[in-house]
Image (tube, helix red, strand yellow):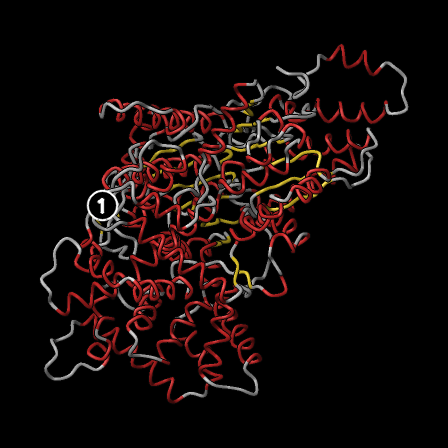
Amino acid sequence: MSDSNFTAAVPQESLHSELSVRSPILPLREKILAIRNSLRPGQQQMADWQSGPLAISAVPGAGKSTGMAAAAAIAIARQYERSSPRRHLVVVTFTRSAAANIKAKIRKFLRDDLSVPQMGFFVYTLHGLALNIASRHSDLSGLQLENVTLITPTQSHRLIRTAVEEWIANNSGIYLRLLEGHQFDGEETERLRRQSVLRTEVLPELANTVIHEAKSSGISPEKLREWSKQTREEYAILSVAAGLYDQYQNLMRSRDFIDYDDMILAALRVLENDSARRIEQNQVFAVFEDEAQDSSPLQTQLLEILASDGDKTDNSSQTRLIASLNLVRVGDPNQAINSTFTPADPIYFRQFCEECDRIKQLATMDQAGRSTRIIIEAANFALKWINNQWLAAANNKQQTPINRQVPFRLQTIRPVEVGDPQTNANPAPVGRGLELYTPRDIHHTVELLSQRVIELFGEDPTKNSAAILVRENRQGRWLAEALTFMCKEHNITLYDVGERDRRSHVPQEILALLQFCDRPHSPDYLKAALEALVQRQLILTQDLNALASLPEEFLYPGPLAAPQSETVQKAARLCRSLLRARLELPLYQLISFLALTLNYEQAELATADKLAERVNQQIAGNSSMGEMLSALSEIVSSERFEPVETEDSEERYTRRGQLTIITMHKAKGLDWDYVFLPFLHENLIPGRFWVPPQSQFLGDFTLSEVARAQIRAALHGESTIPDVTQAWEQAKHLKISEEYRLLYVAMTRAKRLVWMSAAQKAPFTWSKPDNLQEQAPCPVFPALKRQFPECVVNLAVMTKQA
């Protein structure tokens, strides 16, 4: 191990010997030592860092943020000790709430434990750091903040839709090839249906996926076209994607829009300039990154340049030697749960860990005090079992396993040692600590869950916190309705986090309905309105493309039209009522009327009222439907509208006396005394790639996922870009791996009890929760039952006792 890059754990005797020497800075060193000795072994390795690269691979509940805050405070104090105030530490994390949290912790260490000024560091999100660099050198970045608008494009964003329409107009030949699919008999109704699917679903999804994947990796449309030439496929998917990407970029430039990736690219343009790069590097003595498993290639590149020692780096060729980086990256590759819907890819952090390991600069924070021992054992077992299943499948296919491609990095959680400073570390279990149920159906699941909640909260509900973690929001909505009466009866607060998310979608839903009211004969606007009505469960799920392909026939069927089913008739009646309201109501009342029509609950209605007031203020003096739509479109595209909230901070999710319903994704970073994991079925975890019936005319794959897998194969340095079949298989593997990591994250949120169930009967899709079918459990669930038979709850005995 190189002494110039890493300070090893110093023996206690030598430290005391050193401290026996009288020095004016002796008290500060004693304080640093006190903080260091209060930490766990993995945290101590962070605190001992003085220069060079260091990778910290942490397990759930290991105290990453506390360890990083302590290490950051010690590094700042050492700079203060050296009288080097000109250079500062940059700390980067994933979200604004995490940035605020770690900033407060660093300040506390500096103020209370080290008694040094609370300065010498900055805490940013990755995009905040990039924006800071780009705005300080606007002449180099080309980013004039006063002239641009930041947007977050999604598949339904009007910019993506416009890019699709312009691409179709300029590429009619390729578009017609997509329209034909595998076979096409030329029937007009089918042609219109396929047009709707391509224009509103397939191509927007492809554009959204590829733009994010390519742009966040610094890949241009030209590069995508070059890669496309290496593949032989009938649709030339990467070439189509490159065309959509080109159109999107042209639209962004013409309208002075930027997205989050543009911030990173602007900062990198600044750092390409030798003078600017030296200025930025000379202000920074090190970079600490939290949640490093969620970085994208461009983000990693930005941090490495900033953390580089310019004297040891060949910046002209962008070659950064690992040993020249004053960079500490902390993450958990086993909690990487965003890579199938964002450009984040845990492979890059794994690579950094491997590079650091080669020069003995890798540490593992494997002790965690959050959970009771049986939960730790269950999580470790699940991790190993899943990896073994993956390796066995690879061997059966005669594939060479690549360690970084297995779902999990093989690091197990260990309980903390006796005397650990964490209060109530590895607490005693409640009941068995792990409880495994196999109910008859989802209704029986609610009965068992309700019974256990009542027992756990007992006479004083304010003593405990609990959460139900669901895979998707539709499960949460159904559970909230099913549990409302029980919670009221037993004085337990029920908090459905999904409600807040739905409130944030109020402007988008209102805009969709108003656009339909303005142009009811537009297939796109009709479909968007129908999707909003389906989402609000006002009409049943059905083939919306077929309805939207012929708007007049759907809304006002003539005597020669085919008879409509009752489901279609209900949808048509609701749409006609919207059109009547448009004619009969004054403009300023329309938003409130639509909010009532959408059956919004109280907080959503308050959000809609706030939205109506905002729009009416903006169009005062020039009131027209066109101005209202323009104002609403601006609000939706710029995301400058916050839903009405009664509280803030994530503490509202973990409040005692409360049963929180939250998705597994949102639960990351949180914990509760008791965690319930119902509905653990194979069709959701690990799930399967399901090709929507309406797009199956293209084949048994989706264009977006094939393109994503092809781009990642190229970025990962594979010798050839996979064909459609291979790419689809790789995409399946990415999804399966991430779903299993999501389950691992969910299990490790629990402190004293994790309650898991897989009902024998469950819906095939939660858009139709009453349509129950036999469902296979998540494959890990039976394995857990075999490994922990004492944790399997005998429902027959429970029934007799009841």
Closer to the camera, 671 or 254? 254
**In the image as oriented, which residue stretches furthest toward the front?**
316
Circle 1 sits on which residue?
Answer: 233
x then y, percent, for residue 159? 42, 64
Say whether residue 70 is left or right of residue 256: right
Rendering coords of residue 56 (x, y %): 56, 27
Q: Position of residue 390 (x, y in %)?
A: 31, 27
Quarter of the image where one finds residue 280: top right
Quarter of the image containing the C terminus? top left
Residue 530 location, x and y as percent? 31, 69
Query: From what the image shows, is residue 335 above or below residue 468?
Result: above
Query: Can the viewer see residue 800 in this picture?
Result: no
| Residue 159 in the figure: left or right of residue 193 | right
Name the amino acid, label 1: Glu
Return the residue nearer the eye: 606 or 295.
295
Q: Is residue 472 above or below residue 626?
A: above
Q: Quadrant of the N terminus?
A: top right
Q: How many marks?
A: 1
Residue shown at the point (51%, 86%) measured from the top left: 623
Is 642 displayed left or right of 157 in the figure? right
* Residue at figure coordinates x 36%, y 35% from the top left: 737
Count neighbours of disc 1 (C-alpha within 10 A) and say few if under 14, some if 14 to 19, many if 20 or more: few
Q: Helix or strand or loop: what does disc 1 sit on?
A: loop
Q: Quadrant of residue 435?
A: top left
The residue sitting at 33% across, 72% down in the picture is 525
The answer to whether residue 756 shows anywhere in this view is yes
- The residue lying toward the viewer, choosing from 764 and 762, is 764
Q: Nearer the viewer, residue 283 or 82?
A: 283
